[in-house]
Image (spheres, rainbow, N blue to C red):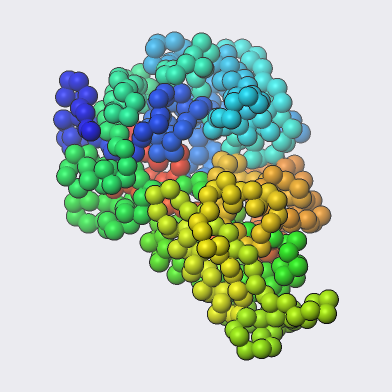
């Protein structure tokens, strides 16, 4: 059911000064940005709340509520100076005490073992050892992560000290909350005291929908000016004269995990053969209908931190067959599946392959079936279970190492540091990759204060990733903004700042 906000806020539609958005939201009951429960909803709260540091179109740190910062010579501490004259929507001034209180609340949530919801910024616990307010505009943070990546962790929203645990606290952003009715609508009005100037769009209303089909229907029948969605249905809409389809990159990295403790995958030549057998561009187009951005490493393609030789990662069936031959896998009986003698027995190159289905579509299972077909072309059998599996079931397989191949997705952090996937024994290292050289590179990365040095280490990490092939990166999933109003000139649209640019100043 669609309801209109009082006072005709939603009826203004497309007058160039207001915008009506459509979003799927059924479970969000509060606006507190530290505890989000729906991904698209974070795009709305990012208009209300602001961080110390923001990330520009080149994914580089830029001043937000902190007008400047400085690292100590060792990188063990960082001093942030807040902008002068910033006020929250309730009229209270922004001070260093608010920053300290917000950080302490994030750390409290992360350490609360009784609460399964650790919040959206729980990884801050790895970056903050101590936080101190030295005066009303100065904050000093002590950290064990003495590197350039520390700045990316400062991208958390700042709340007033007195309201950090409130359901709907005031923010400092370009838009303030006028009304919020969970599962129905959110009405935002222009913050005339915003430090960034006066935005061109003065009013934003969000209508909440129960499902993507309802959302798309609202767009088709002009009930909303724009919608935010990760639904595959959005792929059918092409940009035209009266409507635009803008892609945005989510934080969801899709991978094909390879269990290096499976004897079939111990040999790097087999892992590289699997990589060479895959046509990921075709899978992206056929399964994901283009709503995915190829990446050959854990870093997002096109960014300053990304380095990959396309020739290494593109499909090459001749190379795949040659590598499998060299590794001793032959099709001795002509059944189309390679085999070899191992410990006196003939064994098949037949791999257990697990994937879980998404709630509202079968896109991941479709992708998995295409992977099965492409591997079969070079004599590798990938066996999917006959019954569909849940996320929890697949997660248990990964944790136990009871798999050979597995499609696994990861919600990547703001900080460009994929150590949790690649360092020995780390939390996301389900491939059981164990490399002293890689561990050393991450140790050096986490000691690099200058961006140039940090970038150089990321490049070396990606070179070694390509050489060792511990697992295969597939894509970053994309979402879509369908809109009749060009409300942003942002070049790199990404989660959670999907609406970044909407606050652009009026001419």
Residue at horizontal 83 percent and vertical 80 percent from the top: 344
Residue at horizontal 35 percent and vertical 45 percent from the top: 229
25 sits to left or right of 258: left
Q: Residue 426: give x, y in percent of width and height.
A: 72, 46
Q: Residue 442: give x, y in percent of width and height.
A: 73, 48
Toward the front, the furthest residue is 387
Q: Which of the 4 image quarters holds residue 61?
A: top right
Q: Nearer the viewer, residue 486 or 247?
A: 247
Q: Nearer the viewer, residue 164 or 156?
A: 164
Q: Which of the 4 image quarters holds residue 238?
A: bottom left
Residue at horizontal 50 percent and vertical 56 percent from the top: 388
Residue at horizontal 64 percent and vertical 40 percent from the top: 149
- Give above or below for 104 relative to 126: above
Which part of the image, by quadrant, shows the C terminus? top left
Residue 457 shows in this picture = no
Toward the right, the furthest residue is 343
């Amino acid at each position: 059911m669609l309801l209109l906000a009082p006072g005709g806020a939603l009826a203004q539609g497309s007058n160039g000064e207001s915008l009506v958005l459509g979003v799927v939201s059924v479970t969000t009951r509060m606006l507190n940005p530290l505890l989000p429960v729906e991904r698209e909803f974070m795009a709305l709260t990012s208009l209300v709340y602001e961080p110390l540091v923001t990330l520009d179109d080149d994914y580089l740190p830029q001043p937000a509520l902190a007008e400047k910062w400085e690292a100590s010579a060792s990188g063990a501490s960082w001093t942030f100076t807040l902008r002068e004259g910033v006020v929250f929507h309730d009229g209270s001034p922004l001070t260093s005490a608010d920053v300290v209180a917000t950080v302490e609340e994030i750390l409290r949530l992360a350490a609360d073992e009784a609460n399964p919801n650790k919040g959206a910024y729980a990884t801050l616990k790895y970056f903050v050892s101590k936080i101190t307010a030295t005066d009303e505009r100065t904050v000093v943070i002590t950290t064990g992560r003495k590197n350039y990546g520390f700045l990316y962790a400062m991208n958390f929203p700042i709340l007033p000290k007195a309201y950090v645990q409130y359901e709907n606290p005031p923010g400092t952003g370009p838009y303030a909350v006028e009304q919020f009715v969970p599962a129905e609508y959110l009405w935002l009005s222009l913050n005339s005291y915003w430090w960034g100037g006066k935005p061109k769009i003065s009013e934003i209303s969000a209508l909440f929908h129960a499902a993507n089909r309802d959302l798309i229907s609202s767009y088709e029948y002009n009930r909303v000016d724009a919608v935010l969605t990760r639904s595959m249905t959005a792929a059918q809409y092409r940009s035209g004269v009266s409507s635009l389809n803008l892609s945005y990159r989510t934080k969801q990295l899709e991978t094909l995990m390879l269990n290096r403790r499976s004897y079939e995958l111990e040999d790097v030549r087999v892992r590289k053969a699997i990589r060479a057998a895959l046509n990921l561009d075709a899978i992206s187009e056929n399964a994901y209908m283009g709503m995915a951005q190829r990446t050959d490493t854990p870093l997002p393609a096109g960014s300053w931190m990304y380095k990959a030789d396309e020739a290494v990662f593109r499909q090459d069936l001749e190379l795949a067959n040659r590598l499998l031959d060299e590794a001793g896998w032959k099709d001795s009986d002509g059944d189309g599946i390679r085999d070899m003698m191992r410990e006196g027995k003939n064994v098949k190159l037949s791999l257990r392959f697990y994937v879980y289905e998404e709630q509202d579509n079968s896109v991941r299972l479709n992708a998995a079936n295409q992977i099965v077909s492409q591997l079969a072309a070079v004599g590798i059998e990938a066996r999917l279970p006959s019954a569909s599996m849940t996320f929890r079931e697949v997660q248990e397989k990964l944790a136990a190492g009871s798999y050979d191949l597995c499609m696994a997705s990861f919600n990547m952090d703001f900080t460009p540091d994929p150590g949790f996937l690649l360092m020995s024994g780390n939390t996301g290292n389900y491939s059981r990759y164990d490399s002293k050289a890689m561990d050393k590179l991450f140790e050096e990365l986490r000691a690099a204060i200058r961006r140039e040095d940090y970038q150089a280490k990321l490049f070396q990490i990606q070179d070694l990733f390509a050489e060792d092939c511990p697992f295969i990166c597939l894509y970053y999933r994309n979402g879509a903004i369908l809109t009749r109003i060009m409300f942003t000139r942002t070049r790199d649209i990404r989660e959670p700042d999907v609406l970044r640019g909407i606050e652009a100043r009026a001419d």
